[in-house]
Image: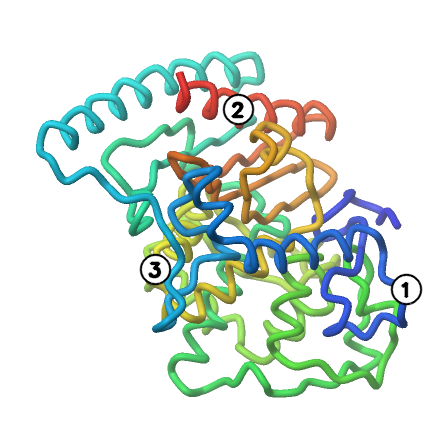
Amino acid sequence: MVGSESVYCGEQGRGGGENVEAFRFPPGDAPLAARDCSRRVFCAGMLTGALASVMSLGGCAACRNEAEGSAVPVKQKANHPSAQKAEAVSRASWIAGLQQDIEALVEPYGGSTSVYAVALDPQTFASLDGEVAVASDARRVAASIIKLPILACALETVTAGELSLDEQITVTQQDIVGGSGNIQSRGAGVSYSIDELLHAMIAQSDNVAANLVIGRLGMDTVNETCAALGLTQTVLARLMMDTEAQAQGRENYTSARDAAAVLQRLAAGTIATPELCERARGYLLAQEDARGIVEGVPGGVLVAHKTGSLANAQHDAAIVYAERPYVLAILTQDLEREQALALERDISFAINARAHS
């Protein structure tokens, strides 16, 4: 299903099921993408040892388990000073060359593209020294990337004891909006837990789910969380699909750096609690839109990401669990959709090429 403004997982885009049990698809009726996503997350959890040995992942989102007694093999850092120094030199060279590569890729498009990338420690997922940044602080219309700080706010509110993932919210007729997601097709009168709504908001970019979560949290609370997390260019000013608010000049904004900051903290487990971050990474791994950044990543490497699109915007922000893990956020505006997706793919490919050169 394609909405009137954008495609796939933006505010207006292709909806698709993802968590078969949570969203009550009749047996056999879940879309293929939903079954694939559910299977991918399940397999990631079951085959952590194999993934760690084959891909040298430092604890991927779907398989990393912080709980006692269920440690997942992670890539061990070399402790010898000479090895650490060699790694730092290698990383500095990689980042310097990559900055030039990215600048060359975006130069033909003028100021239409923002990019921010940062390498992560393969064991702790803390950000490492050095970054790649092109117009990374430029404030862009957020599209569905705004759902990342909404997710962060929900996790913080759960940690504060002011919200439960099991809390139920019933959809009313007034809650039904168009665009991406399946909740709208199930109509009013159906109840969902906060956990189900957050999953749908991220994996399907479900607009009804996002609005219900915003309504429960409050816009002011979301914006206060953004400020507390240091997201200087991010603001939530309207609900999803609120064309009246848009006509009045109210819009949601973010930047590539802000989107990456949320993902880096989710990767490191420093928003709310490590357990809630792990759950959130599961939502991101179930993302159904496999274009853009994912297309530039080698097969078998897990990508936990969130996309967003409007008529004049195409965004993608991801945690990439490569041998050298990293966070990458790409925000584009005023490009043709296929052109923007190709640019996202090329930037993603350039990072991987440099990382393994």
The reply to whether the C-beta atoms of the residues labelled 1 and 2 are less than 8 Å apart is: no
Q: Quadrant of the C terminus?
A: top left
Percent of width and height locating residue 335: 67, 26
Q: Nearer the viewer, residue 236 or 82?
A: 82
Residue name at image x 41 percent, y 51 percent: 59
Which residue bears the numbered disc 2? 347
- Quadrant of the image occupied by residue 81: top left
Give the mark nearest the N terminus, 2 or 3: 3
**Crowding near the residue tagged with mark 2, few <14, some 14–19, many ≥20 C-alpha atoms within 10 Å:** many
Badge number at residue 28: 1
Figure check: 344 above or below 40:
above
Give the mark nearest the N terminus, 1 or 2: 1
Viewer-side label of 2, 3? 2
How far is the residue under mark 1 from the one under mark 3? 42 Å
Q: What secondary structure is found at the residue carrying circle 3?
A: loop
Residue name at image x 46 percent, y 72 percent: 155
Amino acid at pointer 3: Leu
Amino acid at pointer 2: Ile
Q: What secondary structure is found at the residue carrying circle 2?
A: helix
Q: What secondary structure is found at the residue carrying circle 1?
A: loop
Percent of width and height locating residue 240: 69, 61
Left or right of residue 82, residue 260 in this image: right
Left or right of residue 297, residue 327 in this image: left
Give the mark nearest the N terminus, 1 or 3: 1
